[in-house]
Structures are given as C-alpha cells and as structure tokens.
C-alpha cells in the first residue's frame, strides 16, 4: 500500500498495484506495454462522438453535457475516420476510483503530438482539462482534434498518458540545482561557449537548434494540409514527403514560421532525466505577451540515460505553431521549459532499452507511422563532430527571459 503521507509520482510497478487495488479499472485487459516508467497509456473506446464544439462539464457529468454538443457517432471497433479540424469526444476504456489522497494528470503521448493530434482529458464535473482531482471516481473522456491530417483511429489505440500523484512532489529551483551537482541534467551542443549555463526559473529552459542546415540540409518539418488518410495503427508505412515539407533557413539564417502552420523542430540541448525524477514540458501562462498556449508533454525517468560509454542526454523534439502573424526564429532562441517532480520510488523499468522506447536516441524524428529518413541524417546525434559532451551547469535567474514572450504554441 501507498503511505498517504508520501509525496511523488507513482512508478510503473506502483501503477500495477493501483490496477490490482481497483484504483484504475478498464473494460479490457491492460497490456504490459501500456505501463510506462511514470505513467499509464490510456486506450480509446469503441465510439467517438463528433462535437459541435469543445466544452467543459462544469457541475454536470460529461455524458449529461455531451447531449447538448454531439452531432454524430463514429464506430471505432474496426477503425473510424476523424476529419481534420473537427472536435471529437471519445470515452476511454479506463475509469478511475482514486482514494482521497491520490490525484492525476494527463498529457498526450509523444507520438500523438508529433502528428499534430491535439488531445485533452475531460472528467465529470471537471473545471480544467487534463487535471483529475483528489479522490476522483468516474469515467475518463478524451477530446481529440487532428489539426493537420485526417486520421484513422481504432478502439484500443493509445493517444494519451495518465500520471498518478500523491502529495506535492514538485522540485524547486534550489532543489534542482542541488540535484544537478550530482546528476547532470542538461548537455550542451558542440558549439557550447566557455562558461555557458542552462538558465533556471521554475524549471530548466531549452532553446531551438537551427544549426544543422549544412549537415542535414533542413532544420525541421512542416505539416502539409493536403495529404492522404493517415492510419495511426500502422508503423513505417508512409513516406515523409507525402505528409511533411522539409524546411531550411532563409539567407539570414532565420526560420520564418508561417501563421497557423505546424512545425517539428529540435532542442539545442540534450536532456537527461535521472530515475528519481519525472519531467514535464511546462505550460506557459497565456497572458505572457502574445504567447497563446503550450500543451505539455511528459518526460519519463531514464529519458536520455544511456550506458556510460555512450553520449549522455537526448534532444527534445518540439512541436511549434505560430498564431496570427509570421514569426522569425533564430538559432539558440529559448522556446520551452522543463519542470520536474520527484518519483515516489524509482521505476522497475526505465525509459530506454528496457522498454524498447522508440525515441531514446532521437534527434529530429517524426512519428512511428513514417519510413524514417536515412540513418546518416536522423542518427546525426551520434556523430561527435556535431554534438559535444559538455554538461551544462544550471544558473538560477530572476524573472523569465524576454525571448519567451512570443506568439507560439509549443509542446513535445
């Protein structure tokens, strides 16, 4: 049993106990692959409801509120088509019966975000998306909007993840600095300058890497709005060029982001998450200048942790969208921030080789549905001529840098 006075994110072995105790109940057997180091992959049910608009239930249950918004039903048992730009609500196969001292938080899976498939968890009488209050008992629903591609989705597919949390495990900046003295968290690029540090203010800031144009001939991908149907359940089937444009820099070395277009970019720094910690790409306050929203993403314990004879840390793939007006990005511009929480205990299996994690040694990687680019390009991270070994020291800063006030939407 879990001590009610404890504080931390539940690891995969404790999530199994939560299933055995009936805290998480599913309409189907939960396969071992759905237990991640610090989260559980949730699965979509047999039906999707096409909505007039998004909503929050307020004082009602989701099903009570749904009656006012549903326009159509799509059968997902053999695969249903979700149109681009349309909101859908899908009852998940899992439901929760949490004790009074346990809460939960959800995020899209990394493979979901890379396809520009926007998801948000909704619960009965919920006032916020992706947040589940202490002691919640009830169904789970997922709002799904595929913003770039028309997709095919089947019952049992996993689009998002759930973390169970007890206490207040958030790591302060001072604690983060102390941890970094014994566990390197961030590694710099080959071009790191003497004395360069990783700025910290309520988390660690990361910057965008736009330096690889000569080696990779491009610095990112932009989603095509006109493309064929994308079946989420397949692997290695689609050609990248049929769904994505490879993008480079202008003559001044900038990347001009077009309004409302979706981009995949990559961080300049490499991240390493020790087994005692779980991380999350932080959501920015939408009142910060022209920054609209940022949909967070989980980083599991073990991300970027590799054998000592290998180069530590893994780059973060960034999903970026500019709003209203075009926006110019420059190499090294700070775009996002990682916040950290303590684990209740180390997971019995960490992110990486133990779980066959796809993105452990990623650089600029698209989703699993696509035939990957040639190894000489996508495994550029392993080339010591492109990436350095220098760990970056953390530096506590006052206030958020002006570079973060921008009309962008970010996730990972």
Image: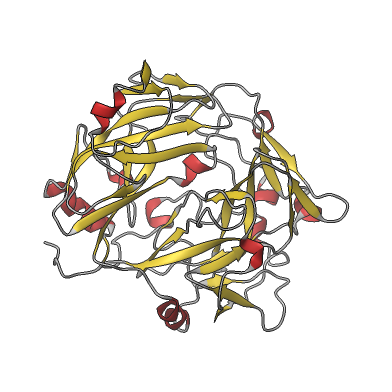
Residue in view at x 67 percent, y 84 percent: 195
How did the renderer colour the structure? secondary structure
Quarter of the N terminus within the rendering: bottom left
Q: Front-most of 223 and 373? A: 223
Q: Front-most of 344 and 171? A: 171
Identify the image quadrant of residue 125: top left
Identify the image quadrant of residue 371: top right
Q: Front-most of 196 and 202? A: 202
Residue 205 place in picture, x, y as percent: 56, 67
Residue 367 place in picture, x, y as percent: 54, 40
Q: Is residue 232 left or right of residue 346?
A: right
Q: Is residue 83 left or right of residue 162?
A: right
Q: Is residue 221 left or right of residue 234?
A: right
Residue 235 place in picture, x, y as percent: 50, 33
Relative to 352, residue 325 above or below:
above
Q: How many marks?
A: 0
Identify the image quadrant of residue 361: bottom right
Relative to 52, residue 318 above or below:
below
Relative to 268, residue 157 above or below:
above
Q: Residue furthest right?
A: 251
Residue in view at x 66 percent, y 79 percent: 196
Relative to 171, residue 37 above or below:
above
Residue 410 place in picture, x, y as percent: 56, 50
Residue in view at x 20 percent, y 54 percent: 134
């Amino acid at each position: 049993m879990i001590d009610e006075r404890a504080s931390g994110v539940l690891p995969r072995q404790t999530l199994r106990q939560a299933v055995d105790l009936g805290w998480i109940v599913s309409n189907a057997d939960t396969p071992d692959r759905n237990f991640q180091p610090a989260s559980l992959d949730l699965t979509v049910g047999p039906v999707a409801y096409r909505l007039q608009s998004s909503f929050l239930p307020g004082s009602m249950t989701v099903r009570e509120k749904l009656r006012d918004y549903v326009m159509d039903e799509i059968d997902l048992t053999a695969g249903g088509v979700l149109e681009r730009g349309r909101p859908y609500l899908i009852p998940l196969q899992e439901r929760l019966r949490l004790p009074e001292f346990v809460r939960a938080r959800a995020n899209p899976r990394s493979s979901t975000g890379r396809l520009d498939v926007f998801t948000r968890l909704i619960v009965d009488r919920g006032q916020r998306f992706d947040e589940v209050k202490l002691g919640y008992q009830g169904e789970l629903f997922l709002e799904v909007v595929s913003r770039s591609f028309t997709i095919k989705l089947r019952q049992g597919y996993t689009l998002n993840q759930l973390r169970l949390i007890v206490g207040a495990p958030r790591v302060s900046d001072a604690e983060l600095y102390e941890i970094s003295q014994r566990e390197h968290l961030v590694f710099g690029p080959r071009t790191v300058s003497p004395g360069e540090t990783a700025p910290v203010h309520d988390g660690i800031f990361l910057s965008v890497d736009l330096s690889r144009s000569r080696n990779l001939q491009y610095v990112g991908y932009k989603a095509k709005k006109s493309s064929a149907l994308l079946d989420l359940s397949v692997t290695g089937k689609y050609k990248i060029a049929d769904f994505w444009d490879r993008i480079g820099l202008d003559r001044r070395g900038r990347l001009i982001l077009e309004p409302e277009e979706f981009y995949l970019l990559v961080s300049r720094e490499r991240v390493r998450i020790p087994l005692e910690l779980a991380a999350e790409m932080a959501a920015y306050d939408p009142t910060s200048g022209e920054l609209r929203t940022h949909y967070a993403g989980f980083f599991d314990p073990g991300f970027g942790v590799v054998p000592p004879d290998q180069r530590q840390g893994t780059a973060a793939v960034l999903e970026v969208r500019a709003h209203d007006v075009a926006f110019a990005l420059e190499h090294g511009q700070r775009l996002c921030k990682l916040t950290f929480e303590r684990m209740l205990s180390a997971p019995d299996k960490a992110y990486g080789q133990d779980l066959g994690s796809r993105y452990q040694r990623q650089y600029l990687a698209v989703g699993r549905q696509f035939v990957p680019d040639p190894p000489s390009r996508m495994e550029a991270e392993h080339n010591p001529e492109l990436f350095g070994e220098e760990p970056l020291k953390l530096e506590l800063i006052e206030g958020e840098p002006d570079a973060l006030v921008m009309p962008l939407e970010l996730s990972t």
